[in-house]
Image (tube, rainbow, N blue to C red):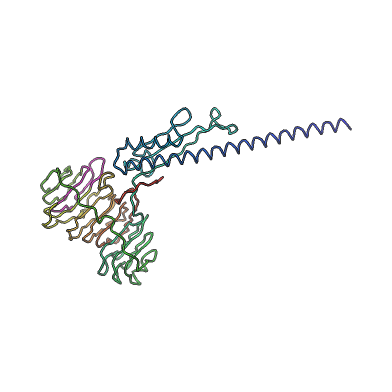
Amino acid sequence: MNLWRSDEAGQALIIIAVALGGLLLGIGLALDTGQIFVARRAAQTAADAGAWAGAAVLYAGGSAALARTAATDDATRNGYTAGTYISVTAASPPTSGTYAADPGYIEVTITEQVLTRFLFGASAGRTAVTVRAVAGLARSGTGQAVIVTRSSGPNTFIVANNTRFTVTGGGTNTNTTNNNSVQVGSGAMLTATFHRVTGNVGAADAGRMSPAPVTGVAAAVDPFVTLAGPPTTGVPLYAGQNITGATVTLSPGIYTGLVTVGNGGTARLNAGNYIFRAGFTTTGTGSIVLAGAGGVLLYNANASYPAAGGACGNLSLAGTGTLTLSASKTGSYAGMLLFQGRTCTNGAAITVRTGTSLSGTLYVPAATLTITAANNVTIASQIVADQLTVTGANTLTMTFTGAAVAGTRVPSLVE
């Protein structure tokens, strides 16, 4: 009997020892996990601060190299200096994510080898913790994908019969005080995050808007009202061009005569600002494409620009050929693709179709912008126009993202 009791006591000691071991292991794992959590939070705070410091340098007009130095210096002040167990890297432009290759942003990555005692798989008793932050010159006015600036008159924003206009990432603002500010035709649909109208909308038109419009709101501010036209000092002058049956590469500058791209013609645009004093049009199968990396600004000016006076030519990109254009990501006109001068009241027109690629703000402050959807097409854009008509009896989807459009830049932590 005593021998049996002795065996039972021995077994109990073994069970207690195993239980205590498991408890200690659990406590150790909990401590390690907590330590990793604290380390991650601290590193993320340092990465965020470093990215913000770099963005502040970019905002002040500093170079990418100065921004990277500011970011790593700030990480050091927060206790993260590159060494045996810590690595700090800063990249401007970022190497990954939504803002990859955008020189207006900076990416900071911190990796710390955190000492852990119980976590399985740790290397030499340490577990790697990696955090990342991206900051830069974000565009303000988030959500204002469409602004129709005209203050009076009926139907200043029209979606024609059987045409569907869908805006993702933002909403529409119609500043018109009329009781019939927006017209959405039979079989048409206007969809966005919101619809804000200073005046009112007829019941039938409102029924074709999703969500329902909010009426009687204050007018949206034109975000580019103080933006001047591009400078001309030192800018080369070129004559007009009639490009048909050939491919011609154009360079940034002032074009004093009409530039037309007709049947079989392709205009390849080098990166930079284009000022058209007599208009820029495509007809027939004429195509416009970018030549290499970088983006462009198309500025439709009056004949005497930058002086006052003289008629404005037409800006009509209505050919059936390829249309591949994007705005520059740097400079005073970053994100602005099309800008028609404020004295130009003749309408601007763009036809989009399968194969079209448009990225950037379309700004027509004193005239009607007409976009014709020849097929179901998606563009990455923002529209600010005196009046807007979307037509074509197809679906036009416009994605609005801060990375793709113009706007006042403010330092911002974005990722």
Task: State the residue in front, 397 or 308.
Answer: 308
Residue 127 spot, x, y in % from top left: 53, 33
Q: How many marks?
A: 0
Residue, far front: 77
Residue 289 lies in the magenta stretch: yes
Quadrant of the rendered image containing residue 382 = bottom left
Residue at 29% x, 42% y is 61
Quadrant of the rendered image containing residue 10 = top right
Residue 188 spot, x, y in % from top left: 33, 65
Q: Quick one: quadrant of the N terminus?
A: top right
Residue 227 spot, x, y in % from top left: 24, 53
Please say whether residue 195 is visible from this viewpoint.
yes
Residue at 58% x, 34% y is 119
Residue, far right: 1
Residue 37 spot, x, y in % from top left: 53, 40
Residue 303 lies in the magenta stretch: no
Magenta highlight range: 270-296
Please say whether residue 355 is visible from this viewpoint.
no
